[in-house]
Image (cartoon, rainbow, N blue to C red):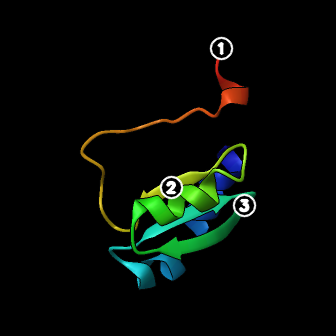
Amino acid sequence: MEANLDSIRSSRETLNTHKGKVAVVTEQRLQGVFVGFEEARKTASKFRVAFTFRVDEKPATRVVELGPEMEV
């Protein structure tokens, strides 16, 4: 997770070109930029850990979704 966060921090300039859109970052790479969360979730669900967020907007609440293999 830390490596993905570092990747997001270092890609800030690139991400800023997609303001208002939803980004998916995993495996230390930007996997895609989408108009809405539904599209982004389809891509994020292919990975064990993925960060999905709206570019340049702080969320009002933080939502963490765990896939079946990560639930306790």
The residue tagged with tag 2: helix, strand or loop? Answer: strand
Could you classify mark 2 by the number of other residues whose Cα lies within 10 Å: few (under 14), some (14-19), or many (20 or more)?
many
Is residue 11 at least partly visible in the picture?
A: no
Q: Position of residue 54 (x, y in %)?
A: 38, 63
Q: Earlier in the sequence, mark 1 or mark 2?
A: 2
Whether label 3 touches label 2, CB < 8 Å: no
Quarter in which the N terminus is drawn: top right
Amino acid tagged 3: Gln
Give the residue pinned by disc 1: 72
Depth check, mark 3 against mark 2: the one in front is: 2
Residue plotted at (53% across, 81% down):
14
Depth check, mark 3 against mark 1: the one in front is: 1
Question: For the view shown, which residue lies furthest in the left direction?
Answer: 60
Q: Position of residue 40 (x, y in %)?
A: 52, 62
Residue 10 vertical position relative to residue 48 in the rendered view, above or below? below
Give the residue pinned by disc 2: 52
The residue tagged with tag 1: helix, strand or loop? Answer: loop
Q: Position of residue 6 (x, y in %)?
A: 63, 56
Real-space Cα separation, disc 1 to disc 2, in angstroms: 22 Å
| 45 on left or right of 15 | right
Give the residue pinned by disc 3: 28
Residue plotted at (42% across, 60% down):
37
Q: Earlier in the sequence, mark 3 or mark 1?
A: 3
Quarter residue 66 falls in: top right
Labelled disc at residue 31: none
Amino acid tagged 1: Val
Residue 43 vertical position relative to residue 47 in the rendered view, above or below? below
